[in-house]
Amino acid sequence: MPMLVLFSVVNASANAQDNSVQFLSRANATVAKAAGLKSHWEGPTTGPRLQKNKKIVYIAGDMSDAAIAGVYNGFREATAGTGWQVLLIDCRRQCNATSRVMAQAVEIKPDGIVLAGVDANSKKAGLELAHNAKIPVVGWHASINPGPIEGLLFTNITNNVTEAAQIAALYGVVESNSKAGMVIFTDSSTPYSTAKSKAIIDVIRQCDSCRLLSVEELPASDAYRKMQGVVEGLEKKFGAKWTHSVAVNDLYFDLMEKPAIAALLANNKVLGLSAGDGSASAYKRIRNNTMQIGTIPEPLLMHSWQIVDELNRAFSGVAPSGMVTPTHLVTSQNIAYDGGPKNVFDPSNDFRAHYQQYWGK
């Protein structure tokens, strides 16, 4: 078992009236719960037998995104030997600007569609086409919230965005003993990232002895060319007051790790926490104690198997499972578990066997 510190009260939504001791106690308890082993299966235990020989269109927001590609690869793993044919449409970050992608998918006449990393609200007309053609669509990160969207998505698979962001911020509070000087990196070009940054800001503002130094609007599309200038400006303005950064995903720390940017922080060890992704590079930084101390990963392979299960429920006329994966925090204390040695979040809850048991695969 990992040597995790256990704390007292559990409540992620501490309010501004709490004193600093109460707030820290609540933060400790929430962080401890999120960092615990994910060895217990909390998903469905019954469902329809897996139907064979289905044709699925997988619409990817951008296959260069490691998470979207990881879900696609996991989907192929879960459907191996089932006769399911998977057809890929890669939007290359142009899905929201392209009105034809859903129509193109419907014209293929698939049994089902997966919408991965594409905002469902931007595709309402196309999703209505699929709905009218009785083609079920399962989303992955297609909406901020998990669950069905009436008339559009049979269900959407994602973690609890607000909870993930809160826990990332709370870990900064705990690690700094409520004395963090925080800079937040966000990207308001997507509803998903906007919801995360709002939750992060709300938590930091509840910590009366923490300092919210700056909220940096830095979309992923601009971050590669702007990060060095942003970090240089922050270092000059805040110096040692800047102790922690919380970002909506790991990309920002990938960039801060580059030698020219890391050199700007050589005299001030800024600690990073991410509210999303759990990339391989983030795992390596946490393991090596370089720049990043925590990330909130999603179980991409388990989500892939859930997508197959939800599609099969739709084919079988059964309601969605309602499963939402618990939020998981990776730190140096628990990185040896739940897939950590492979630099992924792969829960030790034997999810494949649970699905295969009632699928009859």
Image (tube, rainbow, N blue to C red):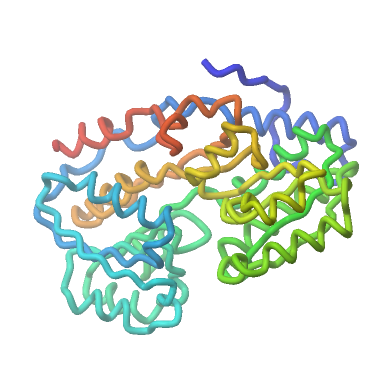
Q: Can the viewer see residue 123?
A: yes
- From this viewpoint, which residue is outermost toward the bottom? 99
Q: Residue at x 51, y 43 (%)?
A: 297
Q: Residue at x 31, y 64 (%)?
A: 137
Residue at left offset 64%, top offset 41%: 292
Task: Look at the image and tell me in which quarter the C terminus lies.
Answer: top left
Tell me if residue 314 comes above or below residue 124 in the rendering.
above
Please say if 173 is above or below 58: above
Seen in the image, is 103 located left or right of residue 53?
A: right
Query: Residue 26's quadrant in the figure?
Result: top right
Q: Which quadrant of the view contains residue 199?
A: bottom right
Residue drawn at x 82%, y 44% is 267
> Does any portion of residue 34 appear in the rendered image?
no
Quick one: 51 or 273, which is closer to the camera?
A: 273
Residue 223, percent from left and from top: 62, 66
Work out whether residue 98 or residue 219 is closer to the camera in this orientation and state it. Answer: 219
In the picture shown, does residue 349 fall above or below 2? Answer: below
The correct choice, above or below, for 330 with respect to 214 in the image is: above
| Count of number-bearing discs | 0
Q: Percent x, y for residue 166?
A: 67, 46
Image coords of residue 95 (percent x, y):
40, 75
Residue 167 image position (x, y, % from top left):
65, 41
Q: Is residue 94 left or right of residue 262?
A: left
User: From the viewer's perspective, is 193 left or right of 40?
Assistant: right
